[in-house]
Every structure is written in structure tokens, then in C-alpha cells.
Amino acid sequence: MWNKIFINLQNLFGAFCCSCLVVAGTGTAKAQDKSLEAFISRYCIECHQSEKPSSGFALPAVDLKEISSNSESWERVVRKLAARQMPPEDSERPSETDYEHSLKQLTEALDRHAVEHPQPGRTASLRRMNRTEYRNAIRDLLALEVDVEQLLPPDESSGGFDNVTVTDLSPTLLNRYITAAQKISRLAIGTPLPAPLGDTIRLPADQTQEEHVAGLPIGTRGGALIPYTFPQSGEYEIQIRLARDRNEEVEGLRERHELQVLLDRELKAEFEVKPPQDGNHSIVDSHLVARIQVTAGPHKLGATFVKKPEALLETKREPYAAHFNMHRHPRLSPAIYQVSIAGPFAKEQTATPENDTPSRKRILTAQPTGPADEARCAQQILSQLLRRAYRRPVQADDLIQPMKFYAAARQSGSFEAGIEAALSAILVNPNFLLRIERDPPQIASKSVYPISDIELASRLSFFLWSSLPDDELVELAERGTLHEPRVLEAQTRRMLADPRSSNLIDNFASQWLYLRNLDSITPDLRQFPDFDNNLRQAFRRETELFVESVLREDRSVTDLLEADYTFLNERLAKHYDIPHIYGSRFRRVQLDPSSHRGGLLRQGSILTVTSYATRTSPVIRGHWILKNIIGAPPAPPPPDVPALKDNTVSASLPIKERLAEHRAQAACASCHNLMDPIGFALENYDAVGRWRDTELGQPIDASGQMLGGIEFDGVMELEQTLAKRPDLFASTLSERLLMFAIGRSLTHEDAPAVRKIVADAKLGADAGSHPGATHQGHGEEYRFSSLIVGITQSTPFLMRTSE
């Protein structure tokens, strides 16, 4: 349902196209009458109050006292005016003063009505945890990290976020949750297994393994560092397979190599790998099997090679750093294909597990003194689990079902087997899987009411942590004080300072900036032979660390667009042609202007996900900026738009000339006149984010035009143009954050709340209000924390409309 609403709104906003707002008269003289009525009469009325209004959009009569009765239409006008998309470029346009004055009159009337008659919208009553939330909830509930991608299918996105379309729980998905609950419970408790288990971790096929892997000892190269939770203490078998080419020969094996198996950086086994004398590669890695003793709990398993001194061959192959197959990128030395873990095999699998794993310490908070004490201990353990899992005080009825599962399992097994069964029941209970928001009893239809403090605690924690509320939040909710503005702000800032707020980078920013798309991006290796998984992951890490620095230092969000620093390791620095950066570790690097690096628009992650496999795309890049930076995306193309005749355009022409055909077709011009000129500013960056000065032997033309006719040349001038309107980016980011926070698409009724969030953030926050604040960049305006605090105190976040 929400997906359909979002699409309709996109069409609604996009249909109000700037190309149709033609006004009568010429000249640029200012109107003497500064009223909104005069503004509309001069610039809009001729086309949008006629018998056949342009784009089918008819302006209602201008009456500021009654403007709220047509708020949906006027919010569309506000959006177009704010982005300077109305009137069209070839018509008489207002001055900046007139724009601001008219917008002020219009938004003040709309916002005043919103205060008097709040419309918070309605989130779904039942929303299940998505895959990311489920992983984090298990981590915080049981102190256990799980590979959720192996357990649950991915979630569909709507409006760019996967926590919106989570109102269904199909039988197939429920079965996956049941299976996951059983596996997680067994792993958390560590009860004896009926038979050894096994897992296989496979490395990406396009991963170069010629250099050091972060987290492994210095002096090693390639391989992998694998976080893994061993269910029990005992003997485990580690088996390693090497990468082969399509002829089943181990790649890069020309001389003797040493391979090591490490557990928490401690050497556990060492092997020799050498070329077979008879040419039979089938047995080269058959001996790479080690039996090692491991204690139960989380560990880091490493499999890597001892690094040899740099060879002349490697130097000659520069500048390419990608070596991962037998064709364009032959490996210089052998690489690991997969690591298999099986066990436990020793007698310890039948013994009582140690009580020192993080998950057992978290769960088994009471130990029975004898059989008569077991039921009491079980109730104590399960009560504590239920309170955290259900995010609310525990009722007597909540214990009935888990205790039944406990009793049934205890009859045929141990006390801990009973706790494991009860835990499985908790993990599939709707009170854990679903976020439930109930309308107050006997409330009138379409009434507005504040959500309860218990519901507010969950909204806050799933927004900032994508996880369960902690004890402090739940206790405040139980006392009924969480909704108080000062308490709510203090909790928001406390949670932002917590490491779990990295969710805003790993989850929110990863979806907002399309970083999740990187895994599916594979540029044409004939044109970009230096691209590999190492570079792909370096792109992602640079952007994550960059966004995190703005969040942790509480800088202005506009610093995301203009920055004189970034985060690099050697692999990425080579790609960017930045010297004197060595090693696998990412570090903050102060940039010289000649590096052409800095804010989001200059980072390889963004530039790569907005390109095709073979070339750049000013269209995709322009659309990305309009949608994610400016907040004024064009409408989807109508179904009757004819296909572009690519075969009539010479491939020898620069991309700017090839795209001219889009704008030559009337059906395409209205949108491509908006997207293409903005995307041209990034043309100095190729499809994998490298700087270039020429294309097809001709100088790059990176000149373009912003909404409102503002011209620029290149990415620097584009950034300077965007910096002159920081409110646009702050509004766009606030909209995306609010959608992520409440888990639904926004409507015109949410616009006043977004404006208030941005207006409050512009005023700045009290110095030192956020731990780690550095007060750099644009001073106190539009601080990240100010936007987030504003969202948590906004009407859509605190209130709800009844069904």
C-alpha cells in the first residue's frame, strides 16, 4: 500500500512540470505588489487557472486564510518554488527576493495550520523486523553475532529503504524465522550437538590477494579474516581450498609458498604449498587440513600466506593492482578460494559447555541449586529475556508459552536444553518479530493521538540503532517520562554517542547513498582492468568513514558536500593517484585541491553506482543529485515515450553530444533538461571514479546548469552552487531521515514537520551538546545531531492517526 502511495506522490510532484508554467509578459522588472496573490497572478495564473490547465494542475484561489483547504496543491507549489523549477527558464522569472518572500508567505500559512491541526499520518499497526533489524536485535538480546544473510531473505525496498515494505509475514518467511530461531538458540546456549556441523566461507572471485589484509599480522598477504562463533569447545577441522582457473590449475603457483592458519592472531597450523612436479594440480591443496582446539564463543579465524619480498614482476605490472584471474588479471601468487569449518569432533561435544561465552553470560543469569530450583531459575531467566525481547514490561501471560516449551524439552533433556527450547519460542513470538502500535481503545476514527512511551522507545531505538531499546529507554518509558522534550533530547543524544548509532551509516546512509548497489556493480574489465573487489570495498569504506566523521564530530551536514579531507588506504589512494599512502589501514587524509577529491560527489562509490558498466551516465548522476541532494527528482518517464535511437548517434562523439538527442525529443526534454546539465558537472570522473581531462581525445566539457538557470563548470562550481542553498540539502536529508525513522513514505502532510526540523537545525545547537563536537565547517547551522533531534521531536515521530 505504501509503495503505491509513494509512486503516486512521485507522479503527482513530477507531473507539475516546470516546462508547463508559461506566463504572460516579458521583462525582468520586479512586481511592486509583494503579496502572494500578485506573485501567483504574474507568474502562474495564466497557465494554471485556465479551462485546460497545464499538466492538468489547476491552481486554487489564493486565500491565505483558507489555504489549508488545498494544502496538497500548495505544497506542490512550495516544492517547485523552493527548487526554482517554476516558472520555466524561457519565461519571466522572479528575483530571489520575490521567491523568498512568496515562499515565506505560503509556508507560514501552511505551517500555522499544521500546528493548529496536526496530521502525523499513520504507520502500519504491525511491522516486522527486517533482516538488518533482526541481526542487531539478536546481537543486543543474546550478545551473539549471526550471519543473517544465510538465515533470512533480503527485504524489498520502497522509497529507497527496506524498513517500509515490512507489513507482511508470509508462511514461507515465517518458516525461515522458525529455522533461524532454532539455529540461533542452539548457538547461543551451546548445548551438545548430535553431530558435527560445518560452514564454508567463500571469498569473492574478483578479490586480489597480493597485499596485506586488514586485521591479519603484518608480513602476511591475501586470504581472509573470518569472524566466527564456535558453538562448543572442542576440536574443529579447518580445510582450505585454493583458487583455480578454468583448467583446474592453481593460479599463480610458480614457486614455494607458506600458508598459515591463525586463531585470534595466534598461529595454529602452517603448510607448504608448492608446484606439483608431475603437473597434477588436483592434489596441491589436498593437505591443507588442520585440526585445532577452540574454546566456545566468538573468535577470528585467519587463513593467509606469508608475504614474500616484492618481486620485479610485481613492479613491472604497475599501475594495475588487480590480480584475480588467468586472463586480463593473472594472479602473481596463489590465493585462497574457500575456508571450511567443521566440528566439534572431540569428546568435549558431550560435556557441559563452559559458562564463559558472551551469549551464555547474557542468557543464563541464574543457575539452579537442584531439581527443585529449576523452575524458579527458568522463570527468572525467561522474564529477563522477555522484557528485552518484547520491549515492554512482562505480564504473567507472557511466560505461559515459553515455560511450556521449557517443560517439554526438560523432560527429555537438560535444564539448558529447556532454556534453549523456550528461547526458540520467544524468537518466533509476534511480540519479538513484530513492532506493534495499537490505537487507544474507543478512539474515534481518524483521530490524532500521541503514541505511548513504550512505543516511542521502540521508534527511537529502531531509528538510531535498528535494534531493541536498552534497559534505560524501557525504564524511562515505564515511568512515562520518555516523551518529555528534555528527556527525549537527552536520550537521543546519548544514543547518538553510543557505538550502535553506526547503524545510521551502515544501514541508513548505505541505502540513501546507494552503497548497497556496489556489490552488484561490475564495470567492463576491458575498459577498466584495474577494478576488483578490493577497490569495490575500499569505495564503500571511504564513504562510510566519511559520513561517520560528520556524524561523530557533529559537523554541519553540508560538509558532506564540501570537505577537504577523506579516508584512504593504499589501494584507494593509488586509484585516486594520491601519493604517499601505504598499507591496508584506512586513515584520514587532508587533501590538496589538485587531488579532485573531497565530498560525496567526488567519491568513487557514488561515481561508480551512477555509471554504466562501459561509460559514465550524466543522466543517472544528474538524477541522483536531484533526488538525493536537491530533493526535486523528475517524474518517471511516461509509458508512451519513444525509445532513444542509439544507432543514429555516433559512438565516437563525446557523451554530451550523444545525449543531445534526449533533449531534441519533446517527450524527453522536460526531464532531461533537468538531469543532464547537472550530471555533466561530474564528467571529469570516469565510470570508476578516476579523474580524466579528455574523452575520445577531446577535452572534457563539464559545464552545466542548475535549476533556476545558474550555470557552472565542473564539480567545484557545482558544489559552490549547492552551498549557496544549504537549506535544499538539509531538507532533502531530513526527508530521507524522517522516512527511515517512521518507516513509511512521506506525504504533503509531512512537509510542515520537515520545514520545522530544518528551521530549528539552522539556528544551531548549544555548544558542546554532542560528545565529540568539533564545530567545524559551516559552524552550528544544520548540524547532524540537530536534524536527528528535530526528527525525534517532530509530529510524525511522536504522534499517530487512528484507523
Image: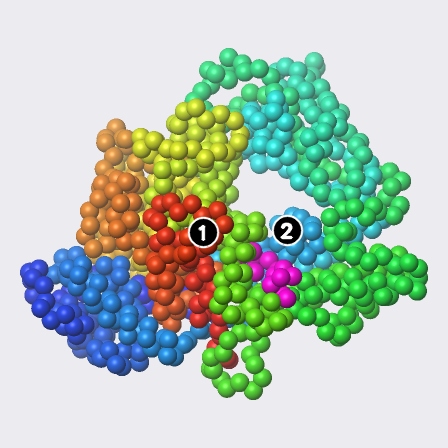
Q: Residues within 10 Å of mark 1 (few under 14, many from 20)?
A: few
SS class of the residue under badge 2?
helix
- Disc 1 versus disc 2: distance between alpha carbons? 38 Å
The magenta stretch is 461-475
In the rendered structure, which amino acid carries the disc numbered 2?
Val
Which residue is at the far right? 371
Which of disc 2 and disc 1 is earlier in sequence? Answer: 2
Locate residue 766, reporting x and y percent. Answer: 41, 56
Q: Residue at x 23, y 74 (%)?
A: 58
Q: Residue at x 53, y 65 (%)?
A: 487
Q: Mark 1, mark 2: which one is toward the viewer?
A: 1
Q: Label 1 belongs to which residue?
A: 768
Q: Residues within 10 Å of mark 2 (few under 14, many from 20)?
A: some
Residue 148 is labelled as: 2
Between residues 724 and 23, which one lies in front from this camera angle? 724
Q: Residue at x 52, y 60 (%)?
A: 490
Q: Is residue 762 left or right of residue 699?
A: right
